[in-house]
Amino acid sequence: MAKLFQKKVEDFICEHCGEKVVGDGYTNHCPKCLWSKHVDVNPGDRLATCGGMMKPVKVETEKGEYLLTHRCEKPVRPGHPGGCGFERRKKVEKEDNFEEVLKLVKNMYNS
């Protein structure tokens, strides 16, 4: 049975904004622009073969915490509209750019 979570301490360069991100084992997105990358099937396993960029698309609150939802934007086929569509939720961390979180909330209500 596959583990549902594997802690991986990895630093990375954000492929969306170029920010150098220092990982802590729970980091799955850039704290500056909030974008992520589709690399996991289960958190930390690095088994996803997609590799698409995951756009922050939604902010929700649950039990007093903000949760950020990312959706994979990689096209399923070249030239085909839409994308992989995989979604994952992750808690907003104190290091995250809260101005970007607020922009996302504003965009959710203006669309």
Image (cartoon, rainbow, N blue to C red):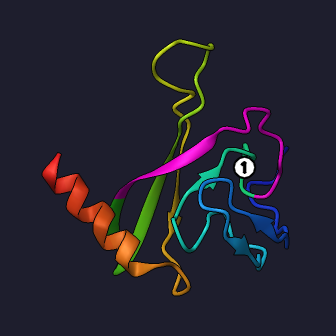
Figure quadrant of residue 20: bottom right
Which residue is found at the position 82% from the left and 71% from the top?
Answer: 11
Q: Residue furthest front?
A: 18
Q: Is residue 97 left or right of residue 106?
A: right
Q: Is residue 73 above or below residue 10?
A: above
Q: Which residues are magenta?
A: 44-58
Q: Is residue 7 above or below residue 44?
A: below
Q: Is residue 64 left or right of residue 88?
A: left
Query: For the residue labelled by badge 1, is the local secondary structure a helix, a strand or a loop?
Result: loop
Q: Is residue 50 left or right of residue 90?
A: right
Q: Quadrant of the C terminus?
A: top left
Q: Is residue 19 above or below residue 79?
A: below
Q: Which residue is mark 1?
A: 42
Q: Quadrant of the N terminus?
A: top right
Which residue is found at the position 24% from the left and 56% from the top?
Answer: 107
x%, y% of residue 79? Answer: 55, 12
x%, y% of residue 80? Answer: 52, 12
Q: Is residue 79 left or right of residue 26?
A: left
- Determine if the magenta segment contains residue 31: no
x%, y% of residue 43? Answer: 72, 56
| Label 1 crowd bin: few (<14), some (14–19), many (20+), radius 10 Å | some
